[in-house]
Image (spheres, rainbow, N blue to C red):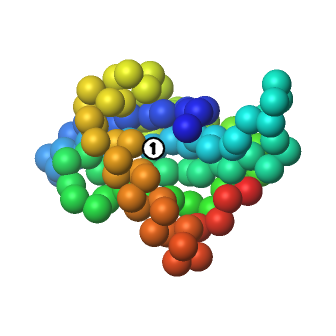
Amino acid sequence: MAFKFIGWCCETDDKGSKHDKIWGYFDNGEPEGDRWSQTQKVYVFWGARGKKNTIHFKDAVLDHDLTKLRDNKRFGKGYEPISEEKLLKIWPTFHEDVDMKLCFDVLANRVMPR
């Protein structure tokens, strides 16, 4: 799993509701010798930290659309970029949660890699 962007939004809105959400996308492609395959699998994910079964996936979109989506999340919605290390500190079971939910969603044809 190679993260391309991880954003974290932890804020309280005007109504006093606390939001603690993660959004991003990663490449799950397989290396072919010294280079990556042309069939890289890009997944967009989001979820609310601390809530059971709240990680979700979206069908991958084109690179140009991913850039627009990332910029909207970052500048329009307040998601601050974080490292994978920080992600695992605030959501220690992230990899396990992704493995379980993504496997099920792909098998159920709920999400398709690009």
> Which of the 4 quarters of the picture holds residue 9?
top left
Q: Residue at x 49, y 51 (%)?
A: 45
Closest to the observer: 6 or 98?
98
Total residue callouts? 1
Residue 6 visible somewhere in the drawing: yes
Closest to the observer: 32 or 57?
32
In this rendering, the answer to whether 109 lies above or below 32 is below
- In percent of width and height, residue 86 lies at 34, 23
Q: Which residue is identified by label 1?
A: 23
Closest to the observer: 16 or 30?
30
The disc labelled 1 sits on which kind of residue?
Trp
In the picture as drawn, the residue positioned furthest to the front comes out as 33
Q: Residue at x 45, y 34 (%)?
A: 7
In the picture as drawn, the residue positioned furthest to the bottom comes out as 108
Closest to the observer: 67 or 15?
67
Residue 82 visible somewhere in the drawing: no
In this rendering, the answer to whether 45 lies above or below 68 is below
Q: Is residue 50 left or right of residue 33?
A: left
In the picture as drawn, the residue positioned furthest to the left comes out as 16
Q: Is residue 52 left or right of residue 54?
A: left
Within 10 angstroms of label 1, few (less than 14), some, or many (20 or more) residues? many
What SS does tag 1 mark? Answer: strand
Quarter that holds the N terminus: top right
- In percent of width and height, residue 107 lies at 54, 73
> Which of the 4 quarters of the picture holds residue 19?
top left
Q: Residue at x 73, y 56 (%)?
A: 114
Q: Residue at x 56, y 33 (%)?
A: 3
> Which of the 4 quarters of the picture holds residue 104?
bottom left
- In percent of width and height, residue 78 lies at 42, 35
